[in-house]
Structure formats: structure tokens, C-alpha cells
Image (cartoon, helix red, strand yellow):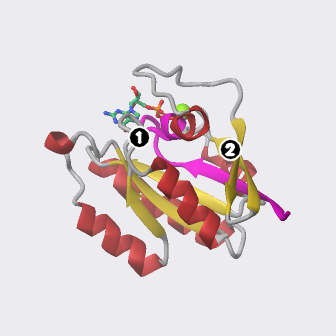
Amino acid sequence: MALRDVKVCLLGESGVGKSSIVMRFVSDKFKQALESTIGASFMTKTIFVDGSTYKFQIWDTAGQEKYRALAPMYYRGSAAAIIVYDVTRETSFQAVKSWVHELHRHGPAKIVIAIAGNKCDLEDLREVREKDAQDYARDIGAIFCETSAMTAVNVAELFDAIEVHT
Ligand code: GDP
Ligand code: MG
């Protein structure tokens, strides 16, 4: 049976829900107050799809968002990058664009980019239209979905899509 290691890194502004997405995917849990720095910034999860085994190695930037110089450590050797923004914070969506530029310039040549608009459960506070993000993602050839780590919307689907594209 085929076994594939897929290294995935999470990028995006602080507070958008990167660690929450990882926790939802790895242990199907959600915590209202996550410590902003989790000691272990590396987690694994194995999934089985169509007779193949995929072992995700997930690198969470865990509080290091401020130190952009460290980012290459995360995306180097990654098959995919998940760039997360918060649908209730327009500035976090603008930050996605700068991460995309950085990956295009300095990231692995064939890295798969996925953009996740997280906190889609907070519809009343929305600042970023789904269509604007979707159009942007299409223009740059990225996977796109809106997620909620809190209500478990589209988190597994996000990783499924990455598995298909890597
Ligand atoms: P990180 O800094 O990007 O790792 O963000 P965290 O995962 O630490 O989440 C920041 C805050 O947003 C925490 O208080 C989370 O509970 C909250 N949060 C994360 N995901 C969601 C979500 O999908 N919906 C809502 N309503 N809150 C979320
Ligand atoms: Mg975090």
C-alpha cells in the first residue's frame, strides 16, 4: 500500500485560527482560548484515501507570525501551504496576498497553495466577501474554501483537497 508523507505549513496573521484549524483536523476539538504559543508546532495525522495512506506533517507557525524571517523554516520542503485569514478581518485577507507573493518568490517551486477563510460561523461580523476571496484564489490557482474551526465546517475537506492536489 502506498504511503505518502505530505508536509503542510500554516501561514497567516496571528489570531486568524491557524492553531484551531490544526486542532480541529488532528483531534476534532475546539477551544475558545488557545495558548497563543503552543510548544509543539509540529503535528502529524494519517488519513486513508482510496487504498493509499497519507501522513500529513503539519507545521503550525505557533506564535512566530511576528518573526517573518522564520517563515522559510516552515514552508521550505512543504508540499502545500495553507494561508489562513479571518473573514471578519479585512486586514488579515490583505496579509494573504503578501504571503502568496513571498511563496511565489522564495517558496518551493511547485508548492500547492490553499487559502482558508476561517471563522465563517461569524456571518454577522463578516468583512471579506466570499466571492472576492474566491476570485483571487482562482486568479493565482489556489485551492479555496471558507472554514470554521469552531463548527468544524470544511476543515477535513480542506485537507482532502490538498491531498488530491499534492
Ligand atoms: P492563530 O493565532 O492563527 O493560531 O489563531 P488561534 O487558533 O489561536 O485562534 C485565535 C482565536 O480565534 C481563538 O480565540 C479561537 O478560539 C478563535 N477561533 C479560531 N477559529 C475560529 C472559528 O472558526 N470561529 C470562531 N468564532 N472563532 C475561532
Ligand atoms: Mg497559533
Residue 84 position, x and y percent, is: 46, 50
Residue name at image x 26 percent, y 44 percent? 88
Pointer 1: what residue?
Answer: 152
Give the secondary structure at mark 1.
loop
Asked whether mark 1 lies closer than 8 Å to ligand 1, one says no
Of the four image quadrants, the one with ligand 1 is top left
Left or right for 137, reference 91: right
Q: Can the viewer see residue 134? A: yes
Pointer 2: what residue?
Answer: 59
**Rendered-image quadrant of the C terminus:** bottom right
Left or right for 142, reference 38: left
Residue extending farthest left? 124
**Rendered-image quadrant of the N terminus:** bottom right
Residue 81 belongs to the span the image colors magenta: no
Residue 162: quarter of image: bottom right
Residue name at image x 42 percent, y 38 percent? 149
What type is the residue that disc 2 sits on? Trp
Residue name at image x 29 percent, y 46 percent? 120
